[in-house]
Image (cartoon, helix red, strand yellow):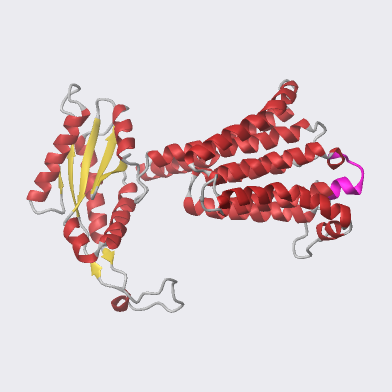
Amino acid sequence: MGEGVQMGLKATFRSFLWFFLPGGLLFCLGLAFALVARLQPLVPGIAAIAPYAVLAVATLLGWRFNRSRLVYGVAVLFLADLFLAGFPVVTSASGSTGRNVLNCLATLLPLNLAVIFLFRERGLVTARGLWRLALLALQPLAVFLVFRHRPDLLPRLLAWQPEWLPLPAALPLAQVPVLAFLATLVLFLGMALTRRRVLDYGFIWALAAAFTALLPWQNPRHATLFFAVAGLILVISAVEEAYAMAFKDELTGLPGRRALNEDLLKLGGRYTVAMVDIDFFKKFNDKYGHDVGDQVLRMVATTLARVTGGGRAYRYGGEEFTILFPGKALDDALPHLESLRQTIQAAGFTLRGQGRPSKKPKKTRSASKEGKRVGITVSIGAAAPRDRQEKQPQVIKAADKALYQAKKRGRNQVAG
């Protein structure tokens, strides 16, 4: 099997883990407790404590780390569970009133999660934050008042069946809430694939758990279990995202220096360190401005992130980057570094014209009108430990010396 195929398989597996953990694992654990006979006796005890514990932890984390979306999401799930528990007729198999209330809840729940998903972080204990919480808390009361004074209104709305989307008649919910869940799922998937953030993936699995909670379980405690699982997914996803942000460079998206220091501690005796520096970056920044300089940093970082040979790129600081090759000797890493250098040189960078529109026009302009193309090159210095006694800081210092030699010899080259 070629190295390219192996790297592709590894990247696919990493993407799967990034999507599946932790939300998918927690969702599967919830299914196990609901379906496995030996685990079912534990459900009442879990359901009695978990919703309050999850809400308390979410509130604490949201207040401490300014994660209002986390608090709102868990609060919606908590209120949905209370609503089901407070209206026993909802879970009754007989009676149109119970089914209408259930379908109304099942419609509002995904729509609320979608709105919360799109919220910008504005703080929790603020006027806007408290207003948002009040709107969430008032929805059950609004539903109750509508059913009391206009009992025919919501049933007619919930009975709508679109001809353009024929869904099975035997669904546990009406078609309107099913469509609400599907539309929210499409939104979550689209945004998650674009932003690739842990909390976005968490919202997908929380939505799946919330839908499962609304299924006609014989034991009503199972609904509480899955609402608690949905909230727990959001909590752990928020913690994972905060941890990832602490180790990731915000501008380039690469792991930062803290992540580099952590990974250096995991290395064995065989590895290669490469220091990468953008040539004449300070002059480029002074001439074209810091915004353009940031674009160049992101462009170079994107290329470095695709390094072959099992390497991993980091933002070291300023215009400097680091690449680690665990388990690779210096001679084995040099061809991959040379390939990176050539790729960056060949790509260049096109300056945006001042009159360039914010949206892509229907008719593409010629290259001469699109913007000036400037060359971008990098110098790379690489080093590996000469023996097992040589420490990582010494190897990085040796890579820095090799980088200096690459610059001294005229830049745009690899030295090692």
Residue 14 shown left or right of residue 134 in the figure: left
State the residue in front, 275 or 126: 126
Q: Which residues are magenta?
A: 91-100
Q: Seen from this angle, which residue lies furthest left?
A: 408
Residue toward you, 288 or 260: 288
Query: Which quadrant would the C terminus be assigned to in this image?
Result: top left
Residue 369: name its quadrant. Answer: bottom left
- Residue 96 among those drawn in magenta: yes
Looking at the picture, does residue 183 appear above or below residue 214?
below
Q: Quadrant of residue 326?
A: top left
Residue at 71% in and 44% down: 211
Q: Is 258 included in the stretch rendered in magenta?
A: no
Where residue 7 sits: x, y (%)?
39, 42
| Residue 24 appears in the figure | no
Horizontally, residue 276 falls left or right of residue 308, namely left
Pinpoint residue 199: horizontal percent, then vertical percent. Answer: 53, 44
